[in-house]
Image (cartoon, helix red, strand yellow):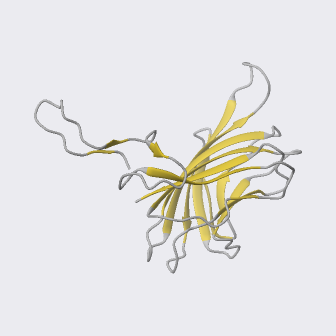
Amino acid sequence: MYYVKAVKGDLTELGNCNLMGAFASAGGGGDSGSWTERANVTLDGAASTIDSSTFTTDNNIMFSAFIKAVTTTGNIEMRLNADADANYCYRGFTNGGTSFSATAQNEARIHDDSGTELEFYIQGFIYNIAGSEKLILTQSCQNTGAGTGATLTQCLITNKWVNTAAQCNQITILPANNTIDTGSNLTVWTAS
């Protein structure tokens, strides 16, 4: 996803330099390899999930989510293409500690809850090749309290969705034990 194309001589002629911040506008085509926004959903009322709806997909998906929970939450989970069968497995770390893992899960784990605070920021990438199992990498942080005296909880989790029949074209985020509050947001981009 990070690449520089058409580098010549003394580097004065850089061609297509596509880094994470080079997004195309929603619905725009952009150059091959550039990120195009496909979904941007903000809840205007509390809900049990936040869902991208079906979007035009590609070989790479990037997503970000800001999740506000109504009351004490559990883990934050994600389903692809509304698949709620035991087609996911994961391994992760919270605050660099001992790893945790699970197989044959009904959803992907995208944040492992470690407290009672109610705000989460999650970024993720999905390697979305037709005919292959989908590899997912997420990093997240959780607000553990107000002010500079409260540090954040950090998670890094890898997931796999074993569906080889279809590419992902829908993302649904759901807290394991809670409701998502007004103002929560999910944004999805794709690139070739």
Q: Quadrant of residue 146?
A: top right
* Percent position of residue 114, x then y: 74, 42
Asked whether, in this view, residue 172 is left or right of residue 47, the answer is left
The reply, left or right, for residue 176 in relation to residue 161 is right
Considering depth in this image, is 75 or 12 the residue closer to the camera? 12
Q: Residue at x 18, y 29 (%)?
A: 12
Q: Is residue 169 visible?
A: yes
94 in relation to 166, above or below: above
Q: Which residue is depicted at the point 79% across and 42% down?
A: 183
For residue 177, side relative to residue 8 (left or right): right
Point out the residue furthest to the right here: 71
Place of residue 29 in the rendered image (x, y in percent of width and height, measured from the top left): 44, 56
Residue situated furthest top in the rendering: 148
Residue at 59% over, 61% down: 90
Number of callouts in the render?
A: 0
Above or below, comparing residue 10 to residue 62 in the picture: above
63 vs 118, nearest the viewer? 63
The quadrant of the picture occupied by the C terminus is: bottom left
Residue 150 figure quarter: top right
- Residue found farthest to the left: 9
Residue 84 x %, y %: 71, 73
Residue 99, can we see it?
A: no
- Along the line of sight, the residue nearer the viewer: 72 or 15: 15
Q: Residue furthest front?
A: 28
Residue at x-position 53% and y-position 58%? 136
Q: Position of residue 14 (x, y in %)?
A: 23, 37
